[in-house]
């Protein structure tokens, strides 16, 4: 793993929010790392292919990068804000219902966040 990949993995694993490639790039620049945005994208692609991070794709929004620990997401339908939620594991229920093995699943629950509900966005 490259030094940049290690730094990116550490940033993602310790982030309190979900980060875009641009967010990661800005964090690295603030750490005085001499990196270009293309290198961030290349290292994210490598980390994804190695199964060390996951990508959250939301229609009409930028992609976010997240740690591997199993969890699902609340996605605000208005502003696109993403928050973690922890639901019971449904793997066995899905497997039994389909009578098939599944590799994985992700749940995105759409809602309207408090800020958008109040009109703050």
Image: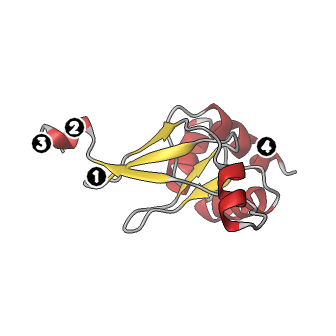
**Would you name the residue on which mark 1 appears?**
79
Residue 68 circle label: none
Dot 1 and dot 2 residues touching (CB under 8 Å): yes
The mark lying in front, picked from 1 and 4, is 1
Q: Position of residue 97 (x, y in %)?
A: 65, 61
Q: Nearer the viewer, residue 28 or 109?
A: 109
Looking at marks 1 and 4 on the same chain, the residue that comes earlier in the sequence is marked by 4
Dot 3 and dot 4 residues touching (CB under 8 Å): no
Q: Nearer the viewer, residue 93 or 83?
A: 93
Disc 4 crowd, CA 10 A, few/some/many (<14, 14-19, 20+): few
The mark lying in front, picked from 2 and 4, is 2
**Would you name the residue on which mark 3 appears?**
119
Q: Position of residue 23 (x, y in %)?
A: 50, 48
- What kind of element bears circle 4? helix
Give the CA distance from mark 2 to mark 3: 6 Å
Residue 27 showing in the rendered view? yes
Looking at marks 2 and 4 on the same chain, the residue that comes earlier in the sequence is marked by 4
**Would you name the residue on which mark 4 appears?**
6
């Amino acid at each position: 793993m490259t030094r940049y990949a290690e730094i990116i993995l550490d940033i993602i694993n310790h982030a309190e929010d979900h980060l875009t490639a641009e967010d990661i790039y800005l964090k690295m620049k603030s750490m005085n790392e001499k990196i270009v945005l293309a290198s961030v994208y290349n290292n994210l692609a490598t980390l994804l292919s190695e199964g060390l991070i996951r990508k959250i794709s939301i229609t009409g929004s930028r992609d976010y990068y997240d740690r591997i620990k199993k969890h699902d997401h609340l996605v605000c339908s208005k502003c696109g804000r993403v928050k973690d939620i922890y639901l019971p594991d449904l793997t066995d229920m899905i497997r039994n219902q389909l009578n098939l093995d599944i590799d994985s699943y992700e749940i995105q629950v759409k809602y309207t966040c408090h800020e958008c509900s109040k009109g703050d966005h």
